[in-house]
Image (cartoon, helix red, strand yellow):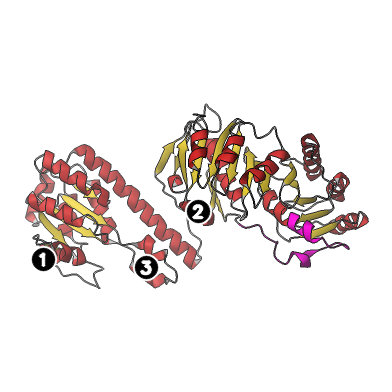
Amino acid sequence: MKIERALISVSDKSGLEELAKGLSEHGVEILSTGGTAKAIADLGIPVKEVSDFTGFPELFDGRVKTLHPKIHGGLLHRRDVDEHVSQAEANDIQRIDLVVVNLYPFEETVAKEGVTISEAIEQIDIGGPSMLRSAAKNRDAVTVVVDPDDYSCIIEEMNEHDGATTLKTRERLAIKVFQRTSEYDRAISQYLNDEQETESSFSISLPLAQELRYGENPHQEAALYGNFDDCFKQLQGKGLSYTNVIDIAAAAELIHEFRRPAVAILKHTNPCGVGVDDEELRLAWEKAFETDRQAPFGGVIVCNRPLDVGLARVISEIFTDVIIAPEFETEARALLQKKKNLRLIQVLGGYKKTLQDPVITSTPGGIMVMDRDTEALGLDNIEEKVKTNRPPTKEEIEAMRFAWRVVKHVKSNAIVFADKDRTLGIGAGQMARVDSCRLAVWKAEQAGLDLKGSVVASDAMFPFPDGLVSAIEAGATAAIQPGGSIRDEEVIAAANEHDAAMVFTGHRHFLH
């Protein structure tokens, strides 16, 4: 069935001229509203106002203009049902074969600073989604377009099929409509829920980003949804698996803690080693690698500066699964490309925007939504948070700041021994904090690192003095922890007994 009548109402005018000219060349009658009608008329193309078509004026500052039986009847009546056709003729309802609508810019409006809730509400489109959904429901007969990128496809198909489109195209475009209106509704509900602080349901609708190689294990299928490609770009290597994506996210969050040039090595989302150095990224790598020379095998390496050939040459000697950087210098890229399976991941500008997104975790029968733990809390005015007789030295405070930023990314119960620019021993995921401390000490011994004069960071409180004493006996002279245990006084007394300095941040960074 040829397209004989089209309704166009767009806030985004990109591509409108080419579309309107293409439809006009096919003799299509164009209906339109407001600014869109004026834009088409200014091109010298015949256009009929919707109010003239319906015989009903626009009302309430344009809030009611397309919500009319002649519009929705023209879209929804089935052309293959005689009774529908008869009812349309009896009520002077003419076919509308093509709908082109993109919605009021609600998302763009609420993204601006200082927007009031009243201003946001005025950008909630009502008629647009209604027309799109009506047309998409009747996709057997009606072509519906919500994305300007599809304009050229419509004209090309009309050129090839004597003014008509194919069913395959109409079906594809109808799916895009329901995806877009779902996203639009979700943005509105999320904004209103946040602004009005009312309890409501949580909805989410995301496009398929990519099929993953497999899930947590090879027998589990997995897929990635959302705008991952706005955050990360894979430059080479095998396709990503479920665990690769989780590791990439963990590595990016960890390295984001540091402003100085930094390198981190992770395995199963846990840091194996972290180092910083103001002179050379390769030196930061050496500090990170010295923490644990075994665990990085098959792990993830991440840095917060462009990866240069000096660092690439060193890490290319190690079997690594993923390397992440904001950029890869040309020589470094050429060297690493020799390892075909090695995944190189570039961090894109869109990543920082996601740091304010909530954390979503599936549960049986639902999901949990939580604020993201983005900032290492409790490091301001650290000199005022000393709990022991001896205050920490300037060097110990610098090491505390470093260790605290690392420990929040280690699975709890987490213990990190550190100097001011490197990790020395890391204990993760043990059932008792004292065991994590012993594990960190053992790892440092295995790496040949001296813990004398180090600081120890604990992601949550020391519930008993034993963990702290174990760290002090291993060589730590200062500790940073949240505090909050009923035995805090005993822990402080143990630190004083060993002349160790201790700071309570007042904030926990537990990570399951």
Vertical order, 494 against 240 (above or below): below
140 or 432: nearer the viewer: 432
136 or 3: nearer the viewer: 3
Q: Callout 2, which amino acid?
A: Thr
Q: Which residue is mark 1?
A: 52
Secondary structure predominantly adopted by residues drawn in magenta = loop
Does the magenta segment cover residue 5?
no
Q: Which residue is mark 2?
A: 354
Asked if labels 1 and 2 touch by Cβ distance under 8 angstroms, the answer is: no
Give the crowd class for mark 1: few <14, some 14-19, many >=20 residues within 10 Å.
Answer: few
C-alpha span from label 1 to label 3:
28 Å
- Nearer the observer, disc 2 or disc 3? 2
Q: What stretch of residues is rendered in magenta?
A: 375-399
Vertical order, 124 against 298 (above or below): below
- For the point 20% across and 38% down, the residue is 167
Residue 226, can we see it?
no
Q: Callout 3, which amino acid?
A: Ile
C-alpha span from label 2 to label 3:
25 Å
In primary-sequence order, the first of circles 1 and 3 is 1
- Nearer the observer, disc 2 or disc 1? 2
Q: Which residue is mark 3?
A: 121
